[in-house]
Amino acid sequence: MARHSEVGLTRTPKRWAARLLLVLSSTLLCLFLIELALRVIMPQIGWTQREDPLLGWSSREYQEFNPHADAATQRKRILFIGDSFLAGSGVASLEHRFPVLLRRHLGNACEIAILASGAWGTDQELLAYEEKGVAWRPDIVVVAFTAINDLKNILSNSSGSRMPKPYFMYSEGAGLTLHSSDGRQAAQAGREALRESPKPDPLWKRSLLLRLVALKINRMTSREQYDPAAFPLVDERYKHFTYRGALYEEIIAKQEQLTWSPQMGANDVSAFIKEDFRFNSYGWQLLEQILARLHGQVERNRGQVVLMLLPVAFNLRDPDTIAGGPFTQQFKTPEGPFTFRSAEPRDRLAAICARQNITFFDPTDEFRTHVIRNSQMKAFWPDPKDGHFADRAHEYLSEICVKWFSSQLKQDASQPNNRPTNLK
């Protein structure tokens, strides 16, 4: 009996080791299969924001962009700068974005690059141009304006309640000044020191599964982590960034009486408000100064700025709420009435471009007409909770862009290439 017991004891650890090895192997195999599935089904997880020392955050594509590559080419260069609509949200592949499709259509006529990241405002897009765009020496810089969030994004020192960022302030006396995320005015020398290229992600951060888990945890805990009181130097106008989707639905439902007051803060409604309230009025002034600074820099580098209004929809089931559309309604709020107007962003941007001598590209009428005639709302925005364009919307928008940019390139064809050869 003793010998049998001893044999049993010696076999037990081996069995447990074999079982443990089997469990570990199975777990690793499952994780590997999940990782592969995510790379096929949700590749956009890998395109999400990464911390950036100058911009607050940026995309992997931006951090890997080398502006000095192919420096010898003499083809016309078009640089698109924007937010998540250009960074890849809503598409199955980065190759399906309308600037990439535009490049395919135009062939060898030009080169196209994209500097974009989710939740960027026009302020960060300006800084991105200064950091990398200017060194690429673009002939045309296209600023893609997103009406539902670009005005609110420049009126904030953070991405929602997660990541602090630098921001601009404007006053007639001081002009346009850059401030760090804590509200301190940023010195030029300090900005230059931050221009070093961020380090690439370590191997463990390249896992989409780990990034997805980290994103979920971040979203659940972000409201508790970020405390505006921790940044006492930040101007009060840049702290009004809280926003609840349930209140947003009241405007979608077009109910006459709202329980909140969009005119009292920076939110998705700001760019659509007709009246000049404190926040939206200041936001438009600030935007104009940011665009003026960008225009001045691009012009000095012998380039051209094009402000493009993206045909985004406020209500994903109502084509009249596409930016530039006819929807207009006055709403009553606890702080008084205001007028929501779908065409407000277009009219404001057109006026800014006229004052600053900036080219304005407005595809909204043609885009909206196509959506209505061909019943494309669900095809262009299949997810009622996601306002980003689907692949089919990018495809049609690229067709509009082909016609517009082809005419621009034809106008420039007879002019010599006057790009500077040595930009600092």
Image: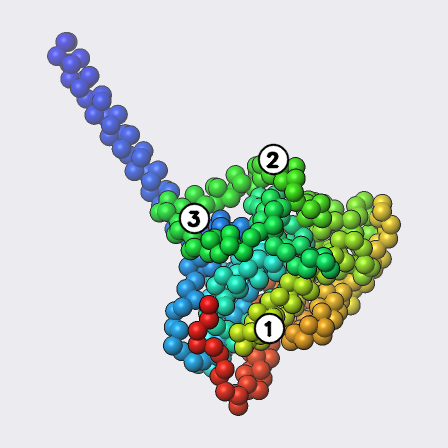
Along the line of sight, which residue is nearer the eye, 279 or 180? Answer: 180
Q: Which mark is drawn over residue 258? A: none
Mark pair 1, 2: CA separation: 40 Å
User: Mark 2 is on which residue type?
Assistant: Glu
The reply to whether callout 1 and callout 2 are in contact (CB within 8 Å) is: no
Give the image location of residue 271, x and y in percent: 73, 59
User: In x, y percent, where is residue 347?
Assistant: 75, 69
Which residue does the image show at 79% across and 53% down from the upper left? 278
Q: What label sits on residue 208 in the rendered view?
A: 3
Left or right placement of residue 164 versus residue 43 in this view: right
Label 1 belongs to which residue? 305
Q: Residues within 10 Å of mark 1 (few under 14, many from 20)?
A: many
Across and down, in percent, residue 300 comes to: 56, 74
Identify the mark nearer the N-term, 2 or 3: 3
Which numbered disc, 3 or 1, marks the residue that appears first in the sequence? 3
Dot 1 or dot 2, earlier in sequence: 2
